[in-house]
């Protein structure tokens, strides 16, 4: 009988004994770990632009000649506001986000829906190389002017016309 009492005593007071409440193990070892709250990753200007303009948006379009001083700056040199030469595939944009493109020196590529023009960037793909005057950079309206040699007679006769566009790629100045 003594053997059974010793066994019972060891079993009851042993640290290996199971906890009656249903938990298994040592309370010191199995403390729940505190979850560290991670800060959300802040969105960059690039992320916000892509998110805002990844779906088709309406813009009012036309064309211009970067060497005509009546359509652009006095004493034109053929370069846009972003310092790049205006050529096939170049567009000028007037939108509320134009200043951000200028300040961050971004290379922003747009896809124009149903535009069968092949540029150096692909079919219907254009790069923003110029920013319109500040009067076009206000409100929700977006203006896009194409390099005059990219548009055919049909579009030139229309004067101003509606297009659908979306941003397909943004390259930052440091990339």
Image: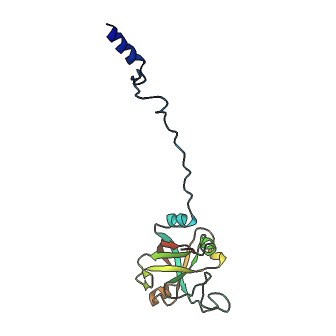
Residue 158 picture location, percent across and down? 49, 84
Residue visible at 32% across and 11% down in the picture? 4
Quarter location, residue 14: top left
Question: Does residue 32 appear left or right of residue 174 in this picture?
Answer: left
Picture quarter with the N terminus = top left
Colour mode of the rendering: rainbow
Residue visible at 49% across and 90% down in the picture? 149
Residue visible at 51% across and 42% down in the picture? 35
5 shown above or below 142 = above
Asked if one can make out residue 160 in the rendered structure from this viewpoint, the answer is no
Question: Does residue 4 appear left or right of residue 32 in this picture?
Answer: left
Asked if one can make out residue 109 in the rendered structure from this viewpoint, the answer is yes
Q: Nearer the viewer, residue 53 or 83?
A: 83
Quarter location, residue 120: bottom left
31 shown above or below 94 = above
Residue 165 picture location, percent across and down? 47, 73
């Amino acid at each position: 009988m003594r053997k059974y009492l010793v066994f019972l005593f060891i079993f009851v007071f042993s640290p290996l004994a199971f906890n009656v409440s249903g938990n298994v193990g040592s309370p010191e070892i199995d403390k729940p770990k505190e979850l560290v709250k991670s800060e959300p990753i802040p969105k960059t200007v690039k992320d916000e632009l892509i998110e805002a303009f990844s779906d088709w948006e309406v813009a009012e379009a036309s064309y211009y000649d970067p060497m005509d001083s009546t359509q652009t700056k006095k004493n034109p040199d053929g370069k846009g506001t972003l310092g790049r030469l205006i050529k096939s595939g170049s567009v000028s944009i007037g939108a509320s986000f134009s200043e951000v493109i200028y300040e961050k020196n971004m290379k922003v590529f747009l896809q124009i829906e149903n535009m069968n023009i092949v540029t150096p960037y692909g079919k219907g793909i254009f790069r923003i190389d110029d920013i319109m005057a500040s009067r076009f950079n206000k409100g929700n309206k977006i203006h896009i002017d194409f390099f005059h040699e990219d548009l055919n007679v049909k579009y030139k006769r229309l004067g101003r016309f509606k297009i659908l566009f979306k941003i397909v790629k943004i390259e930052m100045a440091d990339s």
